[in-house]
Each structure stands twice: as structure tokens, then as C-alpha cells.
Amino acid sequence: MTIKNICCIGAGYVGGPTMAVIAQKCPEINVTVVDINEKRIAAWNDKDVENIPIYEPGLSKVVAEARDRNLFFSTDVDSAIYKADMIFISVNTPTKTYGIGKGMAADLKYIELCARQIARVSKDDKIVVEKSTLPVRTAEALKNILENTGNGVNFQILSNPEFLAEGTAVEDLLDPDRVLIGGDIDTKNGKEAVEALVDIYAHWVAKERILTTNVWSSELSKLTANAFLAQRVSSINAMSELCEKTGADVNEVAKAVGMDSRIGSKFLKSSVGFGGSCFQKDILNLVYIAKSFGLEEVADYWEQVITMNDHQKKRFAANIVKTLFNTVSGKKIAILGWAFKKDTNDTRESAAIYVSDYLLNEQADIVVYDPKVKEEQIYADLDYLNSRAEEENRRRVTVVNDVYKACDEAHAVAVLTEWDEFKELDWQKIYDHMLKPAFLFDGRRLLQKSAIEDIGFQFYAIGN
Ligand code: NAD
Ligand code: UGA
């Protein structure tokens, strides 16, 4: 089975970069990425490739190479589906905000809409690939919709979860640890569909790194991988609080522990708490699934990862208030970094949002600087929490594009994203222009304690 036309529904952080790399590596395949969000598609098509809607190192170069050759971005979902031999579903699967499973289960309404649209439009056989992160056994529901509302067309459903991390998406896609493909490997048609997708990745990924499994294992492996990664961050963050009480240093502990080859050194960086669109959402989803099977202990075990993460954000913010003589009311606090990690403009579930909200509840005045996040996004993130009137957010929060201006006359500075440029700042100059005593809170262990303290700052760093 040779794939000539691919359609990807969803031009977001996963659909855009993933398809750009497939198009770059498979010039003989036409790849069309579609989305209902017209503004997003217009940005993907912007003449100036630096204006594509997602900031990822190296991405604009890949897009520039393939766009209008065999990579297309469009809002015409129907015709892309109609033409495609293989359709990736890469739409968002957020936590439900209503009804049964509110605050826990994945909201699959966008997935279902895609399935119904595919069923309605398709006139020949198609391979449908789950790229979105989904609860285990979603493929069953998809199959049900496709087969019962279709036009007698045969559909093969594959699970091909994405493991890229933001900020390193292009690197991760070009050189993945593994590619996982789940399919109906016990049937001839299922095997052929799996092989068709293997062939695409085999253009640039070594065959031994392409794993094929049954669909349920693939779906569950994705949730498991995110749960394990998030658990490591919560584990080291739990230790960071103990370090602060005992005089141990969490970086030294992480290094000592991580050098054990059975444990490994990655994902042991203590922080103000993990953010991002997926860790929390996927663990909550896992907890919900476990609960729905009556597995209370399994559910409680994983839920604790989220509890710890919420605690870490809260205690960081509470420590700022406590250190500033138990009140930040009317005080200016500079927030350096709003993105949930460096090298991305994504702010979903960023710790900065929650720390700022906590400080605003304590009546602080906030000034934010982030090299990649736009002002409108920062206000939208705060408004979304509904903690206070939108006008008050605009009155109490200022967004600036000069980091020194952000810190000017501030009572305290909090580093919340590990942007490299924060390491290179003229901290003496920042200190000189702050109110004294000048407090600096490092939520990322980015700065050198001795150098910062020598300048005169009252310095607090996570886990130290
Ligand atoms: P996103 O919100 O950035 O993009 C999803 C896009 O789908 C949006 O632009 C939306 O307009 C579009 N969409 C929704 N319904 C549609 C429909 N019916 N027709 C056409 N377009 C539609 O989300 P994302 O970050 O790309 O995540 C997508 C999925 O991938 C999620 O399930 C997520 O868990 C998973 N994932 C994300 C990452 C990541 O780093 N962001 C990594 C791995 C997996
Ligand atoms: C994560 C996973 O790493 C990807 O494999 C997965 O595909 C993706 O989720 C997803 O499913 O969406 P991402 O959220 O983009 O990727 O970024 P990470 O590098 O995992 O960071 C997540 C959060 O954890 C960030 O806030 C980061 O600052 C924090 N983190 C990470 C730490 O605090 N310490 C660490 O040691 C590592």
C-alpha cells in the first residue's frame, strides 16, 4: 500500500511540526494540514515564514523547504479528507470542563467531530491515524462511528502517539527515541496499514526504532510515558522541599541519584512545577480511566503527582509573600518568563500563571517579561482563571518587552521560565534599580547563588 496523499486534521503544536517533518522527508507524498481556525492557517501560510504560529527552534526552516512543494495548509477540511489515503487526527483533547468526568476525563468531542466528518466525506478506503493523545480504547469508539455512519468505505485505525516535547520538537521528530504504531496486527488489512505508516517513518527513522504493537498498548503507552515523566518531576520537587528544610541541595541530590544508571539523569530538574498542555491533562485522564475500572489505589497513586505539582507552585508563591514581610499588597513583583518552559511560546498550564494569580490575590502589582509570549496571551491566561474582573487584570498586570524595565523599582523578581537569556542578564544593573532589600526568587535553579548574593540580593532558589 503506497501512500500518496496525507491529510492531517489539526494544525497545532503537534500537527504543524509533525507534518512539516513528514513532508520534508517524504517529498513524493502530498501533505495537507487542515484546521477550522482560519487565523492559524493564515499564519502557517504567511509569506514571511518567521510568522508561522508556533515558535520552535528549526521549524521555520523545515516549513520553508516543504511549503507549497508538498506541504499545504488549508481550511478546506472536506477536500483534504476526500483526497487523502491516510488521515492523521491531531486535534486537541483537553480535560472536560462540564458534565460527567468534569475536571478529569479527556473531552473527546473534537475527535468525534473529526470521525463523523471523515465518515461523511470519504468515498474510498482510508487509514485513520490517532495522533492526538487519547484514552485507551478510543480507537474502538472511532471505528464504531466510522463504520456505522460511512459510505461502505473500509477504515483501518492506527494509533501513532506523538512523543515530541515543545522547544525541541524538530529535533525530537528528526531523531526520535522511538516511533510507536499500534494497529490491528492480527488481520491482513491491519498489518498492511501498519506497514504503510512504518514505510513513511522509515524514510528517516531506523527500523529498529519503529515499534509496532496492538492498538490498546499503543494508546496506553502514551499516557504511561507522560505519567512517568511527570512523576519524576514531582518526585524531585518533593525532595526540593525537604532539601530546603535540611540543608541538602536538590541539584546535588539529583546528580547523585541520576548517576545511578538504573535511575538516569533526565527529568530530575527541580522547578516551580511542571506546566504544559499535556502532563496534567493526561494524568487526570489516566486517573479517570483507573477510577472508571474501580482501581482506586491506582488512581490515587497517580493523582498524587498532580497534588505535588500544585503544592510546588503554591508554596513557591506563598514563600514570596512570606519573605516579603508577609505582605505583597501594592508591591511590584517582576515575573521573568511566562512560557511553561524555554524555547516555546506555549503558555498552557504554565506555572507562571498560577504563581501570578496567587500574588494578584495578595494584591501585588505584577510586571511580566517573556521573550516569546505576547501580551494578549498573558491577559487571556489570567482572564481564563476567572479570579477577578478582566479590567483588574489589565490594571494590576503590566506586560513589557524590556526585561530591565520589568525589574525597575521592583520589590522582588521571580524567574519562572528557564530562558537562556536570563543567565546572561546584567544582574548588577537590575539590583541597582530595584527597591532594597532586593529579593530574587529563582524557580528554575538558573542562577549562580554565590554571584547573585555577592551583588547583594536576598536570594531564594528552589531546593537550596
Ligand atoms: P493544539 O490546540 O495546538 O492544536 C489542535 C488544533 O486542532 C487546533 O488548532 C484546533 O483548531 C484544531 N481542531 C480542533 N477540532 C478540529 C476539527 N474538527 N477540524 C479541524 N481542526 C480542528 O493542540 P496540540 O498541542 O497540537 O495537541 C494535539 C494533540 O496532541 C492533543 O491530544 C495532545 O495531547 C497531543 N500531544 C501534544 C503535544 C504537545 O507538545 N503539544 C505532544 C504530544 C501529543
Ligand atoms: C511532554 C513530554 O516530554 C513529551 O514526550 C510529550 O510528547 C508531551 O509532553 C506531550 O504529550 O504533550 P512538553 O510538555 O512539551 O513534553 O515538555 P517537557 O520537556 O516534558 O516539560 C514539561 C514541563 O516539565 C515543563 O514545565 C518543564 O519545565 C517541566 N520539567 C521538565 C521540569 O520541571 N523538570 C524537568 O526535569 C523536566
Image (tube, helix red, strand yellow):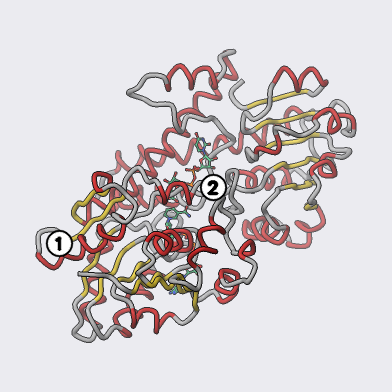
Q: Is mark 2 within 8 Å of ligand 2?
A: yes
Kindly identify which numbered label has been placed on residue 167. 2
User: x, y percentage for residue 73?
Assistant: 49, 73
In this orientation, does residue 220 appear? yes
* Residue type highlighted by circle 1: Lys
* Residue type highlighted by circle 2: Gly
Which of these two is toward me, 115 or 356? 115
Residue at the image point whose x is 36% and y is 60% from the top: 131
Q: Quadrant of residue 135?
A: bottom left
User: x, y percentage for residue 177?
Assistant: 35, 42
Q: Who comes first in sequence, dot 2 or dot 1?
A: 2
The answer to whether 77 appears left or right of 330 in the picture is left
The answer to whether 360 appears left or right of 260 in the picture is right
Q: Secondary structure at mark 2?
A: loop
Residue at the image point whose x is 75% and y is 30% from the top: 440
User: x, y percentage for residue 52?
Assistant: 59, 64
The residue that disc 1 covers is 191
Looking at the rendered image, the quarter that the N terminus falls into is bottom left
User: x, y percentage for residue 169?
Assistant: 48, 50
* In the rendered image, the vertical position of residue 39 relative to residue 55, given as above or below: below
